[in-house]
Amino acid sequence: MFCPQCGSTHQVMVGNICKICFLKDFKLISIPQDIGITLCAHCHSQSKEGKWKDLGLSEEEIIYQALEEAIGVDDIVSDINIELEILQMRGSIAECFISTRGNVMGEDIEQEFHSNVRLNKSVCPDCSKYNSGYYEAVIQLRADKRPLSKAEIKTADKIIKETLNRMWVKSRMAYLAQRVEMKEGIDYYIGSQKAARKVISALRDVFGGVMKESPRLISQDKSTGKGLYRTWISLRLPEFQKKDFIKYDGHTGQVKSMNSKKIIAKDLETGQSIRALWKDYEQIKSSAKFSDIQISTITSKSPTEIQILHPETFQPVDLHIQDHMVDLEIGKEVSVIQIDGRIYILPDE
Ligand SMILES: [Zn+2]
Ligand SMILES: [Zn+2]
């Protein structure tokens, strides 16, 4: 066969030209001279086909990915090897160098290409909400009939920070837009309802408390008819804290633990557990504080009675002996608490 381009007569033909002439113009890969990508300047989310996606990639990785996606390799190429390099950034344009090696029809070929990746920096909807201070929920942390303690505030701040940080990986709306400290408590403004719910549940796991939600319609989208709701979620911590004393359902006890569902106290008379649900919080009476505990001394003891000195009047007081008092010896100091005129000896912790 005769090659019309070089006149050769002894080469393998590809179509109507010889292999040498065919390979001269053959390109191992196809790649556009200019590639444009749209990404968020704040979080590096990428906009693809009208949808914003956060792939958690660095700017460099995004450029390499854009190159990889734009490269096409012909079916007749085998053993292809492609190396990508960002030569330099010129403004928002990455000048890239692509070196390739491959085998075509038994011939090893090396070729070099250049391509420019333009980074169109924009702001994704989530970041734009964040930047505008947008929030969907307000968590109002309060305590019943008392201010929040410093320790409670510190713990709450930590829980909120950690919960949002964990969620932030997946949801850009898991952010604290604002934190407002007031005399009555703290308001936390949270980006999304979903994040606020996670935060509340994490707070309740630690503090318990009574939760109340009140959604309010903020505005209505005229075109879709969809309403924008903002939710105020108040979490009221109990008047009592751990180790304080409560009265509930005819029993007096010391609070041992609290969780999202209930309060567990130890009955001062029977030593048994008292359980109260948060929904019955209004029926729990806060009776004495941990700091009200006083010290007294045992002055006499019989199989059924134990006598101590009143911590204030120093008059002898006879009490019915309980299991945990059996081993107490005369002269020993004990912790006592006065509740509604009655004195209880507390078991050693
Ligand atoms: Zn030829
Ligand atoms: Zn963003």
Image (cartoon, helix red, strand yellow):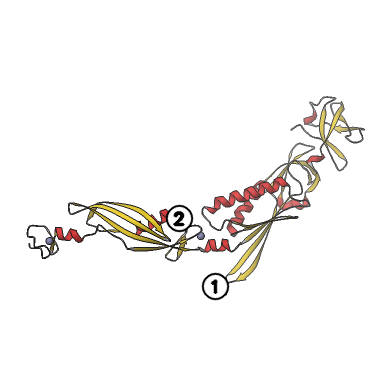
Ligand 2 within 8 Å of disc 2? The answer is no
Q: Nearer the viewer, mark 1 or mark 2?
A: 2
Identify whether 325 is placed above or below 9.
above
Which of the two residues, 227 or 53, is positioned nearer the viewer here?
A: 53
Q: Which mark identifies residue 303? A: none
Which circle's residue, 1 or 2, is located before the other in the chain? Answer: 2
Q: CA distance from mark 1 to mark 2?
A: 29 Å
Which of the two residues, 51 or 295, is positioned nearer the viewer here?
A: 51
The location of residue 27, given as percent across then percent down, is: 24, 59
Left or right of residue 164, residue 309 in this image = right
> What secondary structure is found at the residue carrying circle 1?
loop
Q: Quadrant of residue 191?
A: bottom right
Q: Residue at x 77, y 33 (%)?
A: 347
Identify whether 337 is placed above or below 215.
above
The location of residue 229, given as percent across then percent down, is: 62, 66
Left or right of residue 57, residue 278 in this image = right
Which of the two residues, 213 or 129, is positioned nearer the viewer here?
A: 129
Q: Quadrant of ligand 1?
A: bottom left
Q: Can the viewer see residue 247 in this picture?
A: yes
Looking at the rendered image, the quarter that the C terminus falls into is top right
Identify whether 217 is placed above or below 41.
below
> What secondary structure is found at the residue carrying circle 2?
loop
Left or right of residue 54, residue 154 in this image = right
Q: Residue at x 65, y 59 (%)?
A: 138
Which residue type does callout 2 highlight?
Leu
The 10 Å Cα crowd at callout 2, few under 14, some 14 to 19, many 20 or more, is: few
Looking at the rendered image, the quarter that the N terminus falls into is bottom left
The location of residue 126, given as percent across then percent down, is: 53, 61
Q: Which residue is mark 2?
A: 55
